[in-house]
Image (cartoon, rainbow, N blue to C red):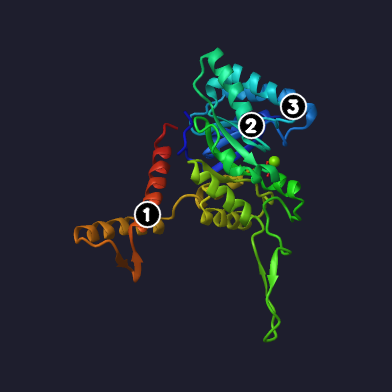
Amino acid sequence: MPIKDRLHRSELAVPGSNPRMLEKAPTLGADIVFMDLEDAVAPADKEQARKNVIHALLHHDWSRCAVSVRINALDTHYCYRDIVDIVEQAGKHLDTLLVPKINTPEDIYFVATLLSQIEASKGLKPIGIHALIETARGMANVEDIAATCPERMEALVFGVADFAASTQARVTHMGGANADYAVLTHPEGGKRERHWNDQWHYAQARLVVACRAYGLRPIDGPFSDIQDAEGYRSAARSAAALGIEGKWAIHPSQIALANEVFTPTDAEVTRAERIIAAMADAAKRGQGAVTLDGRMLDAASIRQAEVVMEKMLRIKMGQEQPA
Ligand code: GLV
Ligand code: MG
């Protein structure tokens, strides 16, 4: 069965063509590592990368993180062999397959059917799927995709780079802010100001709703300016504000940033505890709503506080896993 509440604050991308990086990847503190056979690997290296990934699954210690492999997209001839070779030879060690450029529910069924056959023939436990939504078509079908194969689907990732290509959006760098996506305030009163907006808001918000409607984790994709920690943090915080629960790290330096942003702060945890306590008191007095620090609380506040407490519990349980 898929692990729907797997910790997924940081998802480290590692090129399958780089055995040295594959060896280091499980030790770097990411919640999930995906070994890439798709866009980080040149066509001439695809076959060797597949062998490297199988070797890494079989021989490295993946007990400290979840491990995934990004296969090539379904419209390439690499795809079927990626699935067959990796799952047949090393499926026992694999938590999920990360499937790029999912356009329709049928794409998920294709991968799921192949997985079922290989699992049956090799006696493997079911392998999860997490999928990239990164085409206009995938986004147009995101609700139907999210509802597909609940027995395998764990998460959807917003792939901003391919999404920009597919929608012909004008961008600065992968996942970065864009000064053109702004409003200029009205000239009334003299001074005009330019207010930057987030050009990915609609896509991210839509993906969050689709995921939460069907019990999947919404995850944000890459931020390519690896020197810009503040820019990464800001993009991650804005995603977290929408309900996204993790982000890709395309460089090891981004892992700690993602883990930091997607872990509730001490202040959030303290407030959640106080809300739960205040509402428990209110319940004893037969009241449905109370004020805390001058703000109204009701049953929805308890649900929000419980989300924070459950996340903390999962993080603590993750940290208690044997090193
Ligand atoms: C990830 O694959 C992306 O296209 O952003
Ligand atoms: Mg992509």
Which dot, 2 or 3, sits closer to the camera? 2
Q: Which residue is mark 2?
A: 106
Residue 137 x/y as whole percent: 69, 43
Quarter occupied by residue 234? bottom right
Identify the residue at horizontal 28%, vertical 59% (top origin): 279
Instruction: Pinpoint residue 81: horizontal percent, then vertical percent.
Output: 69, 21
In the rendered image, which residue does mark 1 sit on?
Answer: 305
Residue 43, picture quadrant: top right
In this view of the protein, can residue 135 be seen by the observer? no
Q: Where residue 308 sits: x, y (%)?
A: 40, 51
Secondary structure category for the residue under label 1: helix
Marks 2 & 3, CB-CB < 8 Å contact: no
Q: Earlier in the sequence, mark 2 or mark 3?
A: 3
Mark 2 and mark 1 residues within 8 Å of each other at the beta carbon: no
Cβ atoms at labels 3 and 1 below 8 Å apart: no
Q: Earlier in the sequence, mark 3 or mark 1?
A: 3
Label 3 residue SS: helix
Q: Which residue reaches farthest bottom?
A: 189
The residue under label 3 is which amino acid type?
Answer: Lys
Out of 309 and 107, give the one closest to the viewer.
107
Q: Is residue 120 found left or right of 135 in the rendered image?
A: left
- Indicate the amino acid at tag 2: Glu
Give the structural element (helix, strand or loop) at label 2: helix
Can you name the residue that lies furthest to the right here? 44
CA gap, disc 3 and disc 1: 46 Å
Q: Which quadrant is home to the C terminus? A: top left
- Mark 2 or 1, which is nearer the eye? 2
Q: Is residue 17 visible?
A: yes
Numbered circle sitting on residue 46:
3
Amino acid type, label 1: Ala
Reply above or below: 55 against 255: above
**Real-space CA distance between mark 2 and mark 1, rounded to the nearest whole angstrom:** 37 Å
